[in-house]
Image (spheres, rainbow, N blue to C red):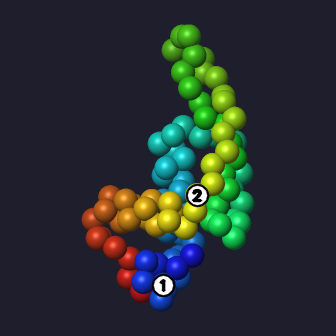
């Protein structure tokens, strides 16, 4: 995956960290991540609260993160870290 200028490759570490943050926020568990020509395909289960405080249900979910989606996640991650963007 290249940065918005198309000149530099985005580091896998940054991309996977940003994707992991999103999946944590959405309460994903039992996750499979596959790199495809379009981006990353993610399969897993989303944990939702059950009827009481002790229980939860798992709902299967499949998402495709395109390069554009990943760039947006990366930009949000850089803002959270306060760096304002990635360095080449």
Q: Which quarter of the picture shows residue 61?
A: top right
Q: Residue at x 51, y 14 (%)?
A: 53
Residue 50 is left or right of residue 34, and the answer is: left
Mark linked to residue 65: 2
Q: Position of residue 47 (x, y in %)?
A: 59, 30
Quadrant holding the C terminus = bottom left
Give the camera-side residue of 52 and 4.
4
Q: Nearer the viewer, residue 4 or 59?
A: 4
Disc 1 residue crowd, few under 14, some 14–19, many 20+, Cα 10 Å: few
Which quadrant of the structure image shows residue 49? Answer: top right
The residue at the point 71 percent across, 66 percent down is: 36
Query: Which residue is found at the position 32% from the left and 58% from the top?
Result: 80
- Where does the image place residue 46, in percent across and percent down from the top left? 61, 35
Q: Where is residue 1 shown, x and y percent of the image?
A: 57, 76
Does 62 sit left or right of 68 as displayed?
A: right
Measured in 3D between alpha carbons, the distance from the residue under mark 2 to the one under mark 1, in whole angstroms, is: 18 Å
Q: Residue at x 60, y 21 (%)?
A: 56
- Res. 69 mark: none
Image position of 13 (left or right of 86):
right
30 in relation to 1, above or below: above
Q: Which residue is mark 1?
A: 6
The tag earlier along the polypeptide, 2 or 1, is: 1
Q: Is residue 17 visible?
A: no
Q: Classify mark 2: helix, strand or loop.
A: strand
Secondary structure at badge 1 equals loop
């Amino acid at each position: 995956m290249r940065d918005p200028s198309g000149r530099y490759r985005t580091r896998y570490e940054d991309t996977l960290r940003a994707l992991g943050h999103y999946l944590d926020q959405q309460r994903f568990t039992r996750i499979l991540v596959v790199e495809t020509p379009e981006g990353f395909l993610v399969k897993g289960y989303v944990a939702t609260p059950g009827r009481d405080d002790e229980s939860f249900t798992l709902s299967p979910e499949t998402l495709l993160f395109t390069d554009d989606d990943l760039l947006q996640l990366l930009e949000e991650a850089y803002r959270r870290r306060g760096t304002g963007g990635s360095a080449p």
